[in-house]
Image: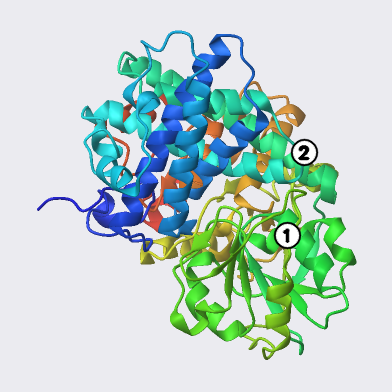
Amino acid sequence: MENLMFCYQCQETAGCTGCTRSGVCGKTPDLARMQDLLIYTTKGLSTVTTALRAQGEEISSLVNHYITINLFTTITNANFDNEIFYQRVFETLKLKDELLAKIVDKRALPEAALWTATTREELDQKSVSAQVGVLASKNEDVRSLRELITYGLKGLAAYLKHANELNYDDAKISAFMQKALAATLDDSLSTEELIALTLETGKWGVEGMALLDTANTKTYGNPEITKVNIGVGNRPGILISGHDLRDLEQLLEQTQGTGVDVYTHSEMLPAHYYPAFKKYDNFVGNYGNAWWKQKEEFESFHGPILMTTNCVVPPKDSYKNRLFTTGASGVAGCTHIDRDENGHKDFSPIIELAKTCPPPTEIEKGEIIGGFAHNQVFALADKIVDAVKSGAIKKFFVMAGCDGRQKARNYYTDFAKALPKDAVILTAGCAKYKYNKLELGDIGGIPRVLDAGQCNDSYSLALIALKLKEIFALSDVNELPIVYNIAWYEQKAVIVLLALLYLGVKNIHLGPTLPAFLSPNVAKVLVENFGIAGIGTVEDDIALFTA
């Protein structure tokens, strides 16, 4: 049967081989092909910008940022609005054509750089052509490496976009992203050259996460140990999800004195750890759990929800009228709030709606603790080192990454429960929701779950590892008593993985399945050179890791 689409960029892709009828995420074939076309035209634009740089031309930040947001909108569970993609393809072609005119010699440019269109019919026709989409690369290994690079760049784009929102930028990162996108169209590159480019993508992933870390901490302060309320108040509320801290800041500013409370959801939880947000008395706490539970949790929240980035699940009709999107996110039929020329977003429609809604229904009580980013952990370094030297802490387990719907992910809950009492979990990302509400206790006052923050804060975990390597005077980060047992879901997890590989971390276990986009030969390279492995049973893995 002919494929209606093909996508295998997320962990839950059908049969761990690829979605061919519709996306497990909720994306339709029509949306899938327009996302594919946007990636194709963005690669064409990137080929042009790379050629212009080679001519000595400077590329504007406007173009750089446009490419960044193009990549971000195609991340899994980010945007479900077909019209957005038609619009962005046309805008990308316009940008590309304007820049193309400046290129002196166009003979070496690929077809993606030269193709253009002016009608929707032309876009529709091109989107189903053999040149567009994952399967355009016929060689399985070349396809695998091209997609691994592309997905890593999508993750990097997400982190760069958040830094850009706080007025932090690095043109060198954009230049690399565009060079790498262009390289995925270059049929002359060998598999060895593509493998090298994959590792270089990891290098720039480290740079991107470092930039965002600087942007967040310089703007909002260093995260600190914080107890976060998971209960509710008696006033109407707005629930904010996703990752964009600037959106949260603007929402908090605009809700002051309105009688409306603000709650975080999923990956916005770590906002509570930043000192700058603690001054808002209507910043009540965190509501709910990981992104995939939002259908039931958004129902019981009652008030409006603001989705700032990816991790959107197509909403139920019962609350669709109170779901708002902004930034890279989008859902057809939901109100989208854009920024003005000064970066300001008017959230008054959300606030006014909130005033008419009942308070959220309480779904749990208590507190959870977090805020163990690198600066806070460095402040505890002496205590942690003493615990390691005394044997009170035998091992650290990095369990960062993503959560998801598959029952196989219960492995991570069971694994956390089964860890010996002298083990500490280092986490970041929504994977934490598998175990951050368990009563795992502490070791000499050090909680056994140290939450560094969002998925991009995996950078903190890398810095912590490098600091421990320095303290213990080790020559190799892999000599540390640290095990990497990471859950993945989408493309931001891919750039974190590539960043860790670039930093020299080996023997990473990745689950609940290895990525479908790794061909057998590419998987073999990762296994042989970096010790990448999957997961087994909880019992077998505990025995392996604690031997």
Residue type marked 2:
Thr
Circle 1 packing at 10 Å, graded few (<14), some (14-19), many (20+), is: some
Relative to 134, residue 425 above or below:
below
The picture quadrant where one finds residue 389 is: top right
Q: Position of residue 129 (x, y in %)?
A: 23, 38
Relative to 187, residue 395 above or below:
below
Q: Residue at x 43, y 45 (%)?
A: 510
The numbered mark, 1 or 2, whose residue comes first in the sequence reads 2
**Secondary structure of the residue carrying numbered label 2:** helix
Q: Are marks 1 and 2 in contact (CB under 8 Å)?
A: no
Relative to 537, residue 316 above or below:
below
**Secondary structure of the residue carrying numbered label 1:** loop
Circle 2 packing at 10 Å, graded few (<14), some (14-19), many (20+), is: some
Residue situated furthest left in the rendering: 1
Viewed as shown, does residue 6 lie left or right of 544? left
Q: Residue at x 36, y 10 (%)?
A: 107
* Residue toward you, 91 or 297: 91
* Residue toward you, 455 or 100: 100
Mark number for residue 419? Answer: none
Q: Position of residue 174 (x, y in %)?
A: 60, 28
Q: Which residue is mark 2?
A: 214
Exactly how many numbered labels are in the figure?
2
Viewed as shown, does residue 238 lie left or right of 177? right
Whole-number angstrom distance, CA of label 1 to CA of label 2: 23 Å
Viewed as shown, does residue 192 lie left or right of 168? left
Q: Position of residue 85 (x, y in %)?
A: 44, 50
Q: Residue at x 36, y 48 (%)?
A: 34
Mark number for residue 345? Answer: 1
Residue type marked 1:
Lys
* Residue toward you, 124 or 218: 124
The picture quadrant where one finds residue 354 is: bottom right
Residue situated furthest front in the rendering: 118
